[in-house]
Image (cartoon, grey):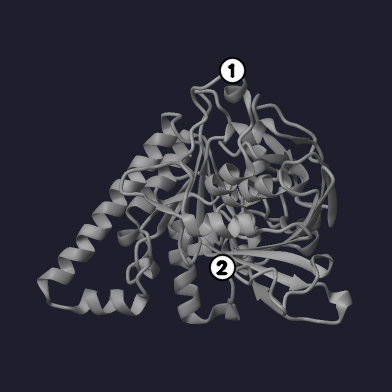
Amino acid sequence: MKGFGARDASGASNAPNVQVGDLPLKSSEVCPSKIKIPGKRAPLDLTLKTALQFVSSSSVKWCHNLSIAGPITQSYRGGSQNSRCARPGKEFLFSRALQSWVYPQSLLPASIISAMLSSTARGENEFLLKRYQDWEDSFQNLYYMLRKNQLNIFYVYTAQFVALFIRGNCLEKQPCNAYLSQSTRGIRSLLRKHGVRFSMPLCNAEVEQVTDDDLMEFSKIQTLNLGQTLHIDALSEVDNTTESLLSFTGNKSVHGLYDVLLNYKSFLNSLSATDVPVLYSPAPFQNGCLHIPEVICREMRKADTGLASSIGLDEEPGSAFAPPPGNMCYSMEIKDVVIPPWVASGICAAMSSDTDHFDLTIGTEPSSMGLNAAFTSIGASGQSKAPSESSPEGCEAIGIPSAVLVRSLHSASLRRLSYNHGEYLAHTTV
């Protein structure tokens, strides 16, 4: 039967090269577990994070003070020639790195949304309609900023999947690309129904070609229990996994995804009783709010002293309980629902400008796994580069100049970074 049944097991191992953007990738390529990156720029990771924990031998009290004081609006314009050429200080880098623009500013629990949807009160219905209309306006504004080359990257975050819209080149005529994580057969069928073309760059199995007629035919067979049919296609096993990532190349395909997400209440029943998706951008947009994650700083005794206690940074250094400076290390934890890549790389840049050594432990949002496949659509010249090659130009092109693009991370994500005297050691997870 066409499109139905499991594929031959040998077919997956001999799968042909799959395409993302203009660069062919072998699905069998495996990212190294450790990668050395020279320089002060941290490797770019387009997956969303939930926590960043820095540990350093240098004090992070200045970070603590800045996170309480709020964003710095210092401008590097005017003044003498020397001041115009001076690099931004660590305080400005850190304050700027924390900033994202989001809508909505906070999510409403599904239970509250359900109660408001079932309510007959006019005010509650008007609130939800206004909230959805504001979200629609915000999404449209972000999308057309991307198309007009006024923005290079933004995210649409839901509890089920993450959509990444990206322009990987600073050239005005460069087409846009998009990526959707954690896809399901239902979503893929919906996209095909509306003529939206996509590929599955991280999937080893053959992409299914199931039409509406096929699904109807299968439904009849399933009703009759003929042959005890259990699966429609080989890809049912990759639903909601990293391998189910969808790639949309070119303006036409990207616009098709945009249309589906814009009308998600009509197309995606699973999201109809939840709050609107969260939009994340590194730049201001319509209805967007400035958002800063939670920052927690601590002083900790080193393990070799035999003490496991820690104190807050408001503890007086002269206190009788304060240990000698040589026995201390310093921790800074940054937490949020999700932390976008411009925040993570920007904070690394601020830290590397202040200290010669730090360790970073990273928590990744599982629903965003696979989004580094977008690396192959990033580049200043649009030309393919070797998977192991790193370059800062691609990151500058998408508006994250504090990071460096390491193409061998396209099928993995970062779980830990160690910075030591101008060099990063990246620990990855597939």
Residue in the foreground of this view, choosing between 365 and 25: 365
Residue 245 is labelled as none
Q: Is mark 1 on a helix, strand or loop?
A: helix
Identify the image quadrant of the N terminus: bottom right
For the C terminus, give its image quadrant.
Answer: bottom right
Please tell me whether mark 2 sits on a helix, a strand or a loop. Answer: loop
Depth check, front residue: 199 or 174: 174
Residue assigned mark 1 = 81
Mark 2 packing: few (<14 Cα in 10 Å), some, or many (20+)? some
Q: Which residue is drawn at 39% across and 69% down?
A: 270
Q: Which of marks 2 and 1 is nearer the N terminus?
A: 1
Is 425 placed left or right of 114 in the picture? right
Q: Image quarter for residue 24?
A: top right
Viewer-proximal residue, 54 or 191? 54
Q: Marks 1 and 2: in contact by CB < 8 Å? A: no
Residue identified by numbered label 2:
232
Q: In this view, does 207 lie above or below 141?
A: below
Residue 312 image point, x, y percent = 63, 72
Q: Which residue is drawn at 75% across and 57% down?
A: 58
Q: What residue type is labelled 1?
A: Gln
Residue 310: x percent and y percent?
70, 77
Residue 196 rendering spot, x and y as whole percentages: 45, 45
Question: Disc 2 marks which amino acid?
Answer: Ile
Disc number lying in front (2 or 1): 1
